Image (cartoon, rainbow, N blue to C red):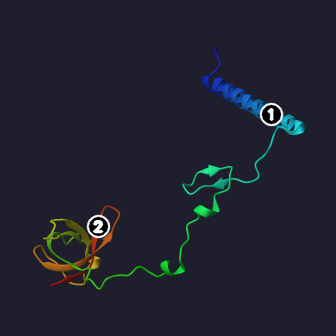
Amino acid sequence: MAKSQQTFNKLEREKNKAKKREEKRKKMAARREAKARGEYKQDEFVYVDFNGNFTDTPPDPAEKEQISLDSIVISPTKKDDVDDRINGKVTFYDDEKGFGFIKNPLNQDSYFFHFSECPDQLAVGDKVEFELIKGEKGMNAVKIIKQ
């Protein structure tokens, strides 16, 4: 009767692990011997140049870029006083399931909406005003107001 494939794979994995352990031991011994002879030198510092690459030499202080404190602005992003509301028309509405789609007449995009986002009862053909948020499957219409 032949050995199972599973046993063969286990043996191969064990051989590979033993081989890696032996290679690691040899490298450690070689480093230890080089250190004892004084050939092995471990770098204490690694520098990063202006491109983000690692180097052995420190960067030149003359090439250091000066930044004035006045140029640094720490504040929330400024939002213009532009109204983010969009006008559209209800193109589909399933009253039983409570969802539908609103079409933006400017770019002909359709946006999903749920009945919970509109306090008024909607029907196909109603003109509405809404805002957009990113949903799981795309942009969703929220804060819907019937016009």
Question: Which residue position is annotated with label 2?
Answer: 139
Q: Toward which corner of the image does residue 77 lie, by quadrant?
A: bottom left
In screen coordinates, is 2 left or right of 36? Answer: left
* Image quarter in which the N terminus is found: top right
- Residue that carries the numbered disc 1 in the rendered image: 25
Relative to 66, 131 lies left or right: left
Relative vertical location of residue 8 with respect to residue 76 in this rendering, above or below: above
| Residue ID at (80%, 43%) | 41
Between marks 1 and 2, how big is the CA–CA gap? 57 Å
Residue 63 is marked as none
The quadrant in which residue 28 appears is top right
| Residue visible at 84% across and 35% down in the picture | 34
Q: Position of residue 14 (x, y in %)?
A: 71, 29
Instruction: List the single residue furthest toward the right.
Output: 36
Where residue 6 sits, quadrant-wise, is: top right
Nearer the observer, 35 or 133? 35
Q: Residue at x 65, y 18 (%)?
A: 3
Label 1: few (<14), some (14–19) or many (≥20) C-alpha neighbours in 10 Å: few
- What amino acid type should be assigned to the residue bearing mark 1? Arg
| Residue 132 on image: x %, y % | 28, 73
Task: State yes or no: discs 1 and 2 in contact (Cβ < 8 Å).
Answer: no
Q: Disc 2 marks which amino acid?
A: Met
Q: Where the C terminus falls, by quadrant? A: bottom left
| Disc 2: CA contacts within 10 A as few (<14), some (14-19) or many (>=20) | some
Mark 1: secondary structure: helix
Count of number-bearing discs: 2
Kindly state the secondary structure of the residue where label 2 is placed.
strand
Where does the image place residue 45, in percent across and percent down from the top left?
Answer: 73, 54
Answer above or below: position of 30 versus 118.
above
- Residue farthest top in this picture: 1
